[in-house]
Image: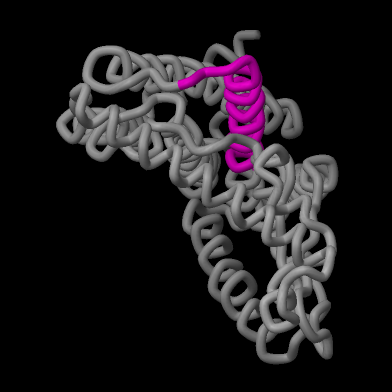
Amino acid sequence: MNLVRAELERLAARRFVQLMLVLLVLAFGVTAVTTLVGSHRPSSIEVAEAQQAAAEERQALESTYQRCLAAARGNLPPEEAESFPDDCSAFDPAQRERLPVATDHLQGVFNFANQARPLLYLLILFLVLFGFLVGASYIGADLSTGGVVNLLIWRPRRLAVLGAKLGTLLGALTAVSVLASTAYGGAFWLIGQTAGMPGATDEGFWPWLWLTWARGVVLVLFAATAGFAIATLGRRTAAALGAVMAYTVVWELGLRVVVEVVGIPRGEDWMLSTYLDAWLTGEARLSDATRCRGVSGYCDGTYQLGWGLGLAVLLAVTGGLTVAAFAAFRRRDLI
């Protein structure tokens, strides 16, 4: 317990961690202030015009669905019928997640329910970046300056020391994520109540919001653990940053170009970003152009990957890096 308390004090005292906290608060503050300045309470005329636009959009959706049904029955000319699939469920307004509403057509009005999804993803992005940088610098600085050696003189158990560092890091990041999310979400909820519109928060809105937030916090812990492990393997904070940059340029960008040029089936399956998307959103919707080769008319080349596979891949990558880091730390010379 004394080791954990000492590590917590060391983590809180690091200037880089303090700087990252300040930058995190500034980023959240700028986002909230920008949203507040760019929003206003809609007038009755604006609401009426938005309701009319939403009604016209719903009518257009119904018209497209009816044309698809007509094509399926053979009541449209062949050149028009080719643009519709045999199964018209994709055009059925009743099958949509939500129908167009008036708030979709209000300009310059912040709608909390409509903007909750992108705002939550932005929050998670900030926290993931924060967790990765803090995790990498926390152990990287100690290894490069000899701080770990001094700590081992006091507690000569390598795995216990490294485990205490990682556990303290993850616990602190969980607390920061909860506090930051509360302040961030509360600020935008108040903006929606006072300088915009709260929007339609149906029975599925809040469960989705909490579930996505929980997945985001888990993703923050994955990122921090990966940064911690890579920096441990490379003995430097820069090792983690260099590894991520190299992976992004060589694999996520370079391999993606090769996949498109060569035409490898389901090339997105080789990208870690695919499984990040699958875990965070619950289901990654991907496109495979090779499915439609030689197919005339309508072709649906999409496929889905679920959150379970995304979690399994993230656990495998993070777990492999962590095991490798602990194994290397246990055996190698630290001086």
Residue at the location (62% across, 57% down)?
Answer: 64
Say above or below: 258 vs 231.
below
Image quadrant of residue 161? top right
Residue 208 % position (x, y): 64, 25
| Quadrant (top left/top right/bottom left/bottom right) for the N terminus | top right
The residue closer to the viewer here, 93 or 193, is 93
The residue closer to the viewer here, 225 or 127, is 127
Residue at the location (84% across, 64% down)?
Answer: 73
- State yes or no: residue 309 in magenta: no
Residue 123 % position (x, y): 45, 34
Q: Is residue 39 visible?
A: yes
Q: Which residues are magenta?
A: 200-225
- State yes or no: residue 217 in magenta: yes
- Horizontal placement of 12 versus 300: left or right? left
The residue closer to the viewer here, 130 or 211, is 211
- Horizontal placement of 280 versus 188: left or right? right
Residue 163 % position (x, y): 71, 29
- Horizontal placement of 123 versus 44: left or right? right
